[in-house]
Amino acid sequence: MNKERDDAQIADQVEEIRESAAESMPMGARDRMREAVKPKIKEAVAQREAMVDAITREPVKGAPSDPSAADSSRITITDVRQHAHVNAYLEAANANLKILGYTEHGRRHASLVGHIAANVLRHLGYGAREIELAEIAGFLHDIGNSVNREQHGQTGAVLANHLLLSMGMPINEVVTVIGAIGNHEEERGHAVSTVAAAVILADKSDVHRSRVQNEDPTTFDIHDRVNYAATRSFLRVENGSARTITLELTIDAEMASVMDYFEIFLSRMIMCRRAAEFLGAAFLLRINDVPIL
Ligand SMILES: [Fe+2]
Ligand SMILES: [Fe+2]
């Protein structure tokens, strides 16, 4: 008997039961649930918008001794953020995925992933330009969803290649960025460079209530449930005697169980562990202050 297929069948059945229960729910009860959830998502979105506003105003801080930081002709994260085509790609990516029922994959996710990826390398002592390339790769990593969800890492890398070359980025930097973008999906990605490892860690740690785009809790899938349940996520990087990268999550246990989290995130956590190892660090996971990994 194929255990994986069995598990998948059980998961499908559970989802069917959940959906039919939601359909048979009286309209008044569904409306009340929706009304209860809407403001909570709105509040989480407002918090994250404010955070993204703050971080996109700050310049990337790097090691001041790195000579590449002083190269004024370099393509900066600000240049990339302000490019009209990048906005169009991100808006289309999010619109396409919203239709498919995915969580938020637009400018907010892009900004946070860029910022977290840069932070990972900054705290581990990498050079200023590498930090900035991680922020650029993180910001662009999901633009391929403007083409199709399938293989969006690869299509995103091709789009970014064209974009960054047209902006005048040197090819040796472009290949670092596109290698990271093309390797961020858990189905087929690998930490092939420090920038790729940082993007993987940043992308997989963005689990948060603000990413839920479906405001009807009666039709939440497991991704909506886990993201809705996550009221805080933080990637803590420590570079002391022990080099560690810890994903700290606060999960509302009434909305999703730790098992729900693992059901969809196990492969992501394995990818994070490998990415952390590439950076010479151990990957740890703490949920509700309890060490899990
Ligand atoms: Fe992605
Ligand atoms: Fe992503």
Image (tube, rainbow, N blue to C red):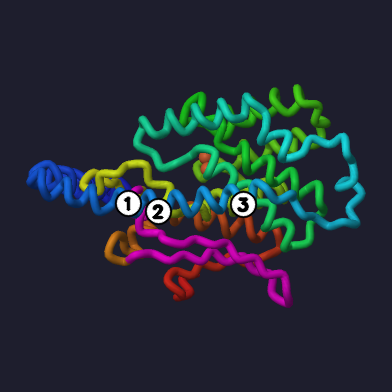
Mark found first going from the N terminus, 3 or 1: 1
Along the horizontal axis of the image, is 230 left or right of 201? left
The three-letter amino acid code for the residue at tag 1 is Pro
The residue located at (64%, 51%) in the rendering is 55
Q: Position of residue 144 (x, y in %)?
A: 55, 30
Q: Is residue 116 left or right of residue 259?
A: right
Q: Secondary structure at mark 3?
A: helix
Q: Do residues under tags 2 and 1 come within 8 Å of each other at their CB atoms?
A: yes
Q: Is mark 1 within 8 Å of ligand 2?
A: no
Task: Residue under label 1, please give it.
Answer: 39
Residue 96: x and y in percent read 43, 28
* Circle 3 crowding by C-alpha within 10 Å: few under 14, some 14–19, many from 20: few
Name the residue nearer the viewer: 55 or 75. Answer: 55
Q: Which residue is mark 3?
A: 54
Residue 189 lies in the magenta-colored region: no
Q: Is residue 156 visible?
A: yes
How many other residues sit within 10 Å of disc 1, few (<14), some (14-19) or many (≥20)? few
* Residue appearing at x 35%, y 36% in the figure: 101
Residue in the image at 31% along x and 60% along y: 256
Residue depicted at 75% across the width and 33% down the height: 174
| Identity, as a three-letter code, of the amino acid under mark 3 | Ala
Identify the magenta region.
224-252
Alpha-carbon distance for marks 2 and 1? Answer: 6 Å
In the rendered image of this protein, does residue 81 appear above or below residue 165? below
The answer to whether residue 191 shows anywhere in this view is: no
